[in-house]
Each structure stands twice: as C-alpha cells, then as structure tokens.
Image (cartoon, coloured by chain):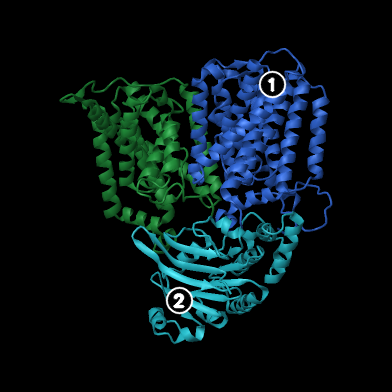
Amino acid sequence: MSALLEVRHVSRSFRTTLAVDDASFEVQPGELLGLIGPNGAGKSTLFNLVAGVIAPSSGQILFDGKPIQGWKSHDIARVGVARTFQIPKPYRQLSVIENVMLSAFLREKSIAGARRLAEATLADVGLDAYGGSPASSLTVGLLKRLEVARALAMRPKLVLFDEIMAGLTPTEVGAMTKFVAGLPARGITVIWVEHVLYAIMKTATRMVVVNRGKKIAEGTPTELARHPEVVKAYLGEEMDLA
Amino acid sequence: MSTLIQLILSGILVGSVYALMSIGLTLIFGVLRIVNFAHGEFLMIAMYGAWAFTHLFGLNPYIAAVAIVPAMFLFGAVVYWLVINPALDKPHLVVVFATMALSIFLQNAALMAMTADLRDIPPIFNRSIVIGSIHLKVELLLGFAITLLCTFALQWMIRKTYLGKAIRATVQDGEAAMLMGIPVPRIFLITFAGGSALVGLAACVMVPLFSVFPSVGLNFVLIAFVIVVLGGMGSIEGALIGGICVGVVQSLSSYYVAPAFGQMFFFILFLLVMIFRPNGLLGQQGAATIGMNE
Amino acid sequence: MSAETIPSLSPRRMAWFPTRGRISWFEIALLLIACALVVSGMASSLQDVLLLSFLFGGLALAWNIAGGYAGLISFGHSAFFGVGAYASTILSTRYGITPWIGIWIGALIAAMFGAVLALICARLRGPFFILSTLAFAEVVRIGALNWSSLTGGAEGLSIMPAPSLIGMVFASKAAYAALMLFYLVAVFAITKGLEASRFGYYLFAIRDNEDAAGAAGVNPLLGRTAALALSAALTGIGGSLFAQYFLYLDPTYVISPELSFQFALLPAVGGLGTAIGPVLGSFLITPLSELLRSYLGSSAVGLHLVIYSFGLIVVMLYFPAGLAGALDKLTRRGRPR
C-alpha cells in the first residue's frame, strides 16, 4: 500500500532558528495520525508546511505520490487536503451555512448543490440549528465545530486538524473525540495536532512525537506512553501520558 | 566625484528632516495600531502656521516652534477625542474612512482659507557652510541637528521615564498593561497628541525648505509611509535610517534621472518600495503583514 | 459591516426589502420612479442632477465591487475613470471609431490597469493597499498630463458637440438620462448577479479572511485581480459615458484624488458591500452636491468636499453600516438576526 502523505527529510529555518529539522514520516490511507510535542516543538511549522502556508527550506512532501512542497495553500486544498485553524478564522460577515458553502464549492459548483452539501455537513457536526446565524455570533466551541465542518465540506482525502479541542468543555471534547475517531471509516485520513493529550491518545492509530524541530519517536499510543524520550520531552510540562 | 559627495550629503540632511516628519506616524502606529491618513494634512496645517508666524510677525520658524508645537499637541488631542477615540472600538474600516475623510476635510478647508497658491518664506540664513567644494545649507544642517536631538530625546524618554515605560507596556500588550493599572486610554491620547506635536516641530523645520500649499500633505504622507515601512513600523531609529535612505535616493535621482520624473518621484518610489520591499529593509513586520482582517 | 439581510433558507418569494442576491419590490419601485423621472420632462438643470445621480450611482456600484465585496478599498479609481474616458474619446476624435465601440475598448484597457494595480498590490493589505491605489492614480494623472501628444496634456480634449447617434452625442438631456439609467441598471444587475454567484462568494471569503479562503481552495490573488479588473472596467465605462455627456476632458479633473474620494464616499455613506447602498448613497449625495455647487458657485472652491468629508466622518462614526444598514434595521424590527 502506498502512503497518502509522505514527508521526506523536510527542514525549515526562520533566519537562524531551525524550526523543523530533517523530519520524515508518512501517513497511510485510513490512518488517524496524532502529531504531538511540547510547546514550540515545531508541530505548527510542520503543519503549515504540509498545508502550504510556508515552503520547506529543503526536503520533499508527497501527496498521493506527487510532490506538493512549495505549492500555494489553495492548490494543496484542491488536490484534497483540508485543514482547520487553531484560532478559528470564520468569514465574519457571512452566515454559518455560507461559511461552509465556500468549502463545498470545491466539490459542488452550483450554489444549490453547495448549499445541500453544506447543510449535510452542518448536520454532521451538529451545527444545523445555526445555519442562518451570522458566523460572528458563534461561541468558541461552535466556531471550532464550524472549522471542522468547513474542512469536511471540501470532501478531502486528508484532513489536518489543528488543536480542535482547545477551549472546549469536557462534554464537547468527548463528543468531538468520538466524531474524529469515526472519520477514517468514512474514507478520510486524519492528521491531528493536539495539546489535549488524553483525547488524542485514545483515538490515534499511530503517533509522531516531535521536539525541538526533530521527530523523536513514532508508534502506537501505548508504545509511546512508555518511550523514555517522549516522557523526558514532556516532563517539563507535567503531562500525564496514560 | 565631489558632485556625488555633495548629492549624498544633502540627501542625508533632507532625509533626516523627512525622518522627523515620520516619527509621529510611526509612534502612533506602534502604540495605537492605527494609521492616520490625515498625517500629511497635520503637517500641512502646521506648515501654514509656521509660515503665518513668519509672514505676520516676522518671527523665524525655529522660534515659532515654541507656539506651533504645543498648538499641534492640542490639535492632536482634539482630533483624538472627536474622531479617533470613537472609532477605536469599531471595525478597522471606520478609522480608515474617518481619517481619510479628515484628510480631505483639512485639505479643502485649507484650500478655501489659503487658496491653492504656493507659500514660501524668505531665506533665513541666506548662506551655506562650505567645506572644500561642498555647500550645505544652514537650514538643512539645523534640521539634521534638530532631528538627531529629537530622536535621542525620544529614545531616552521611552527607555527611562515612567511615561515611556507605560507606552512600551501598552505596545507589548494593551490588555495586560490595563490590568497593571496603566491608563491605556490616556497613553493613547498622549501618543496621538505627542505624535502630532512632533509633526508641528517637523513643519517648523520644513517651512524654510519647502513651499506650502493645500495638497502638499499627499507628497509628504507618502514619503512618511515609505520611511516607516523601510525602517520598520513603530521603530524610531528605523525612521531615521529609512528617512536618510529616501533622502539620498531622491537627491541622486533628481540629478541623474530626467527632472520630469521629479513630479512623480514620491509616487513611483512609494510603489517601488511597496512592490519590492514591503517588509522593510531588514524584513521586519511591515506592509505585507498588516491587514485589516481581525 | 455588510448590512443587508443574510438570505433566509425559506422558499423564494420576492422580498419587500433589499436582500442579498435577490431582487426586491423596493428596488423595482425605485426603478419605476427613476424611469418616470426620465420621461417626466423636468427642467434641464434638474435633468442634469438626475443623470449625474444615475451615473455616479453606477460608478459607486462599480467601486463597491472592489471596495465593498472584495475588501479592496481604493482611493485611486479615478485612474480607471480617466482611462475609460480618454480611450473612447481619443478613439472617436482621432480615429473616427464610434464611442459605442470605443467604450468597450476603454473598459478593456481600464481592466488591464486594474489588473496591474492588483498585481502591484499583491502583497499589500490595509493602509498600504489604500496608499498604493492613491499613488497609482497620481502616476496615471501625471503621465496623462505629460503625454500630451496622446491626451492633449493640460489643455485637454474636446468632443464635437454636434448631436449624432453614431457619435453618442445627444441634444436632449432625457436621452442622456436614459443612457445613464441604463448604465446604472446594468451595473446593479451585475452586482446582484455577483451576490448570487460562486465568484461573489469567493470575494466575500477573500475579504473576510484570506487565509481561510486559501484553505478552502480559493486563489486569493486571482480573486483580487479579477475583482479589481471588473470594477475598473465598469468604472472605465462610466468614464466614457461622462466624456460623452461633458464633451470635454482634462487630466486634473477626470483623474483626481477628489473624484476617487467621491467614488468611495457614495458606497460608504450608502452601505459598503450591499447592492442598494451605493445607489442610495448617490441618490442622496449627488443632488446635494449639485445643489451646493449651484448655490455657492465658484466662490467657494472645495466647500462641497469640506461638507462631504465632514458628513462622511459623522456617518462612519455613528452609522457605519450606512443608509442600507439603516433601512435594513428599520424593516427588520422584531426579526431575529
């Protein structure tokens, strides 16, 4: 089976600091890959490299076997990679459903078609009651769900989640975890960057741990919980990995 | 060779005067995170003020500064209360349109009051300092000295005084500053009025060098923005460096490139900087990253 | 700060009041009144006011496509106006090409100018975009002044005042009024079409959040360029029409910061990012300014701009959603937002 996404020896430096240092990993179709690491480890940079927000200084990123490094984010979106934003970025002057329609346009060219796809997606994430409200009126929790809806309405092959749990109540975290866990079965491969570890440890099929720009470990959640390097990296943060 | 040195030296001097005019803009941007489109018109009004002092009372503009600077401080404070403060909590476009409208308002009010005629004052010193074959106007040297003095004084003020520290805290994190008991609204007011006062000082230095007319502000505001972008938004030393660069480029291009280009100089320079160096000379945060989203 | 009601998901019955992407009875009533005024045979000076209100309504709508919908606030649109006016005028006076064709060539050239401006400003946002549009228009103006072999320089260009259909010069003001009304309706229809189209949504997305738009597969630079080119083309057509009515062009009037400011002012007062806003803005401000001009004459140069800009400050601070926003609030009482 060939990998859906392959990151090969990717580095990225900002002026003098090396934010990502020779990172390599791959994602198979149907996986739910957790990408974790302490603050400032290079998770966000890695994420932005795959999403096309920034270009790598060196290395290759292959999607479906095609090199996509250095592409603009809209081109990457078109080949089937969707993403969410850590700090939600809604179109404030549009309604919730219109926010989702804009993503749906990638697959449904007509307004009516996009509206149907958007309605279905909103129902999927439980936002159907808010379709007509202006996006600017949503609470943080609902905005996070809107981010997820926008990503899914693109019918992506791969979706990148960027800390979709931050700011959610425990109940919301539970519901969202369940929802994300169900995505691979629907043919959507997931890369999930998260700070709320217990959610991701429960759901991920495999995890990649980064620290100081380097990949330090890779494996199933249970393997990693005992991995000495990982425990060391997290010690300063007093994280309970179980 | 001596022509080249002459051009570069006078470019540096003129540029420093440009820098003085830009410091207010960069300060206001750094602290309030807004752009005052009427900045050029503030300068225009202050220049008319300095011109009037000379014209009516025969005072030289450097002495007129004693009146112009406080007057501009007051003017800045009034504008802040009437226009800026009410717009701060509204969408970004409100500040843009409000200050843009203010600029048109001041420009046309000046047109009605003063007509479109160019106003000059007679030369003050009427001589140059001569070093070898190099001639430097006394007005320019004085402007250079005042700019340097002003830059150092401001730097000292911002580093050492309580007000300066409060301003820096506000720049870093307005909300945190507020929680620490810094009166942020008053800091905003003082910065805006202080920035306007600096424009008043710049006007007094500029009146002996440039003619005044109602739309003079447009030229200068573009220069000021070029300087602020080149030197980095919010940086005072940056403004000095940016100003000197602009002055030298202008001085050289007006000599070596066709003079017909001179009319367009400010606009072309502005566009070129925006195309090729929108993030400043050193790649600081600049024009490309400051949007109206959020 | 878009004011018009977000379209409801309810079945499509014709709305009473302006709604995004749909025609309402309110707009139809306005159109009928406008038609009635055109054929009413009012005094010539009033017809001047009427046709200018139509023309500036169309220009305000054209500006609004870039400024209101795509968030590209321009204070340099008079460059496109001037380019359109000069193109059709030079083609007709020098090469005998009828303005009915020249207008389209002018629109095309204006669109190219718009695209160039969009590319110049590709990396710029906020204040720097705005200042670049201002500087761009100044470069075009000074260029037009100095290239006198083409533009006639400061002396300007005149169009033969002999009425002819082919030459698009009319003896009757009513004919001009009809022409300008047609222009207004056409730009309005384009705007409404935009609101209901995928491209329109792309522009909203780019305006509201460029990063999110990119992540959804929208190419922001392409969208901005297309929006500015379309807006410039429509503005250029307005410039050609103005030239055919005024029969005289000179760079300091047709390409000026004052004129650019007016193009932005009308939608700002009327309501940015709405279709009805710029029209209402023009119907309110244009007659007002003509009134001021005729009362004050040339004695007070700049007074109308003093009053305009003062008005704009007040509107911006207290009614940032403009006339359309006020109308929306008035007609939407009780309904949840």
**At label 1, which amino acid type do we have?**
Tyr
The reply to whether residue C287 is in sight is: no
* Left or right of residue B201, residue A30 in this image: right
Placement of the N terminus of chain B among the 4 image quadrants: top left
The local secondary structure at tag 1 comes to helix
Q: Which colour represents chain A?
A: cyan
* Left or right of residue C304, residue B162 in this image: left
Q: Which label is found at residue A209?
A: 2
Percent position (x, y) of residue A230? 42, 81
Residue at horizontal 38 percent and vertical 29 percent from the top? B47
Q: Examine the image and state in which quarter residue A154 appears.
A: bottom right
**At label 2, which amino acid type do we have?**
Val
CA–CA distance in space, label 2 to label 1: 71 Å
Circle 2 Cα neighbour tier, 10 Å, few/some/many (<14 / 14–19 / ≥20): many
* B147 or B194: nearer the viewer: B147
Q: Which colour represents chain C?
A: blue
Q: Examine the image and state in which quarter residue B272 appears.
A: top left
Q: Is residue A21 above or below residue C170?
A: below
Q: Which colour represents chain B?
A: green
Residue at horizontal 34 percent and vertical 31 percent from the top? B250
Q: Which label is found at residue C27?
A: none
Please identify, in this view, whether the residue under mark 2 or under mark 1 is nearer the observer. 2
Q: Which residue is mark 1?
A: C245
Percent position (x, y) of residue C22? 77, 47
